């Protein structure tokens, strides 16, 4: 039977991927909410879904449904995830939440309590764990020498315009800053493959970039993340591209540029088939980005990524 979904954050950037996933898994969206009303995307997937711009009316509608929803999907701004995930659980639904699940490790404990009270479950979108190339890399590391420590360089630059700094994404208190907002899924992927954090050093941190060093159980990771277009290598900019990602392991480039387009649908299939990644599986990464956000940068000392030297 079709599962019944409601979605919070229907006007957001990531919402279309969730709408597509609900549609492609042959389920139904019965209600959607966003304080903004630019949600014409609903016509492409679920034109008959009820839509609300006021949370109270959305809440009242869910209460009045003859058949309750099975899942509530949360795509709202990062700082609202704790509130909205808790709302979904208390409405008697399981919740699928876009990353980052929450901004603080203590928020996970609060949601665990609500899970216990309600008997419902939270699932986090950690889609890189389902990417074929990443799964293969994890298997390669697990089957390799048990005492080997890998050297990793990570670069992710996804340029953003001036609008970014005006929006909630430019407010660190709401988004968690660059590391949380654009890097959380890469940090999750690295810790999933190479183990827990032993050392977490930040070299540079500003409104548009963060660079640092992570020592994991099985890896030494230098990273550079930025939303500044000028940080993209010149040859990439010359090709007309505004995004650049690179991961090297032992100085060999890891190729995983393809296979991103349907990872949300794969995530939904995983959840609906009895899998999915719960609250505890998000904890280590939420702790990691929390620590990065609150760290005092040490400057260009120690094992720093070369791009950290780019002028601010």
Image: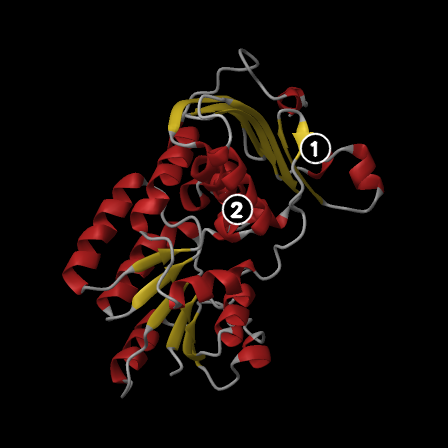
Q: Can you tell which of label 2 and label 1 is closer to the viewer?
A: 2
Residue, disc 1? 231
Percent coordinates x, y for residue 256 in the rendering: 64, 45
Percent coordinates x, y for residue 218 in the rendering: 46, 26
Q: Quadrant of the C terminus?
A: top right
State whether residue 165 is above or below residue 251. below
- For the question of whether residue 113 can be seen, the reply is yes
Q: Is residue 192 left or right of residue 82?
A: right
Q: CA distance from mark 2 to mark 1?
A: 29 Å
Q: Is residue 84 left or right of residue 293?
A: left
Residue, disc 2? 135
State whether residue 292 is above or below residue 263. above
What residue lies at 45% left-to-right and 78% top-to-bottom?
27
- For the question of whether residue 177 can be seen, the reply is no
Q: Secondary structure at mark 1?
A: helix
Q: Secondary structure at mark 2?
A: helix
Q: Quadrant of the N terminus?
A: bottom left
């Amino acid at each position: 039977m079709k599962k019944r979904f409601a979605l919070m954050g229907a006007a957001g950037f990531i919402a279309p991927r969730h709408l597509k996933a609900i549609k492609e898994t042959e389920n139904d969206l019965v209600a959607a909410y966003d304080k903004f009303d630019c949600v014409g995307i609903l016509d492409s997937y679920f034109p008959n879904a009820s839509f609300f711009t006021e949370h109270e009316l959305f809440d009242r509608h869910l209460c009045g449904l003859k058949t309750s929803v099975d899942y509530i999907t949360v795509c709202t701004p990062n700082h609202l995830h704790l509130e909205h995930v808790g709302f979904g659980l208390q409405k008697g639904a399981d919740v699928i939440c876009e990353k980052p699940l929450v901004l603080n490790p203590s928020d996970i404990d609060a949601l665990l309590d609500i899970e216990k009270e309600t008997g419902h479950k939270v699932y986090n979108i950690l889609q890189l764990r389902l990417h074929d190339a990443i799964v293969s890399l994890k298997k390669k590391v697990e089957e390799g020498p048990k005492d080997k420590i890998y050297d990793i360089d990570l670069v992710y630059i996804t340029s953003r315009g001036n609008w970014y700094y005006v929006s909630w994404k430019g407010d660190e208190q709401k988004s968690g800053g660059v590391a949380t907002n654009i890097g959380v899924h890469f940090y999750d992927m690295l810790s999933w493959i190479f183990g827990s954090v032993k050392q977490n050093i930040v070299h540079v941190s500003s409104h548009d970039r963060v660079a640092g060093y992570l020592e994991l159980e099985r890896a030494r990771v230098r990273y550079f993340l930025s939303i500044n277009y000028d940080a993209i290598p010149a040859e990439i900019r010359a090709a007309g591209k505004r995004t650049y990602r690179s991961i090297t392991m032992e100085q060999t480039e890891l190729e995983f540029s393809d296979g991103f387009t349907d990872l949300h649908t794969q995530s939904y299939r995983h959840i609906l088939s009895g899998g999915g990644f719960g609250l505890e599986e998000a904890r280590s990464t939420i702790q990691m980005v929390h620590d990065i956000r609150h760290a005092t940068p040490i400057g260009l000392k120690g094992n720093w990524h070369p791009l950290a030297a780019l002028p601010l």
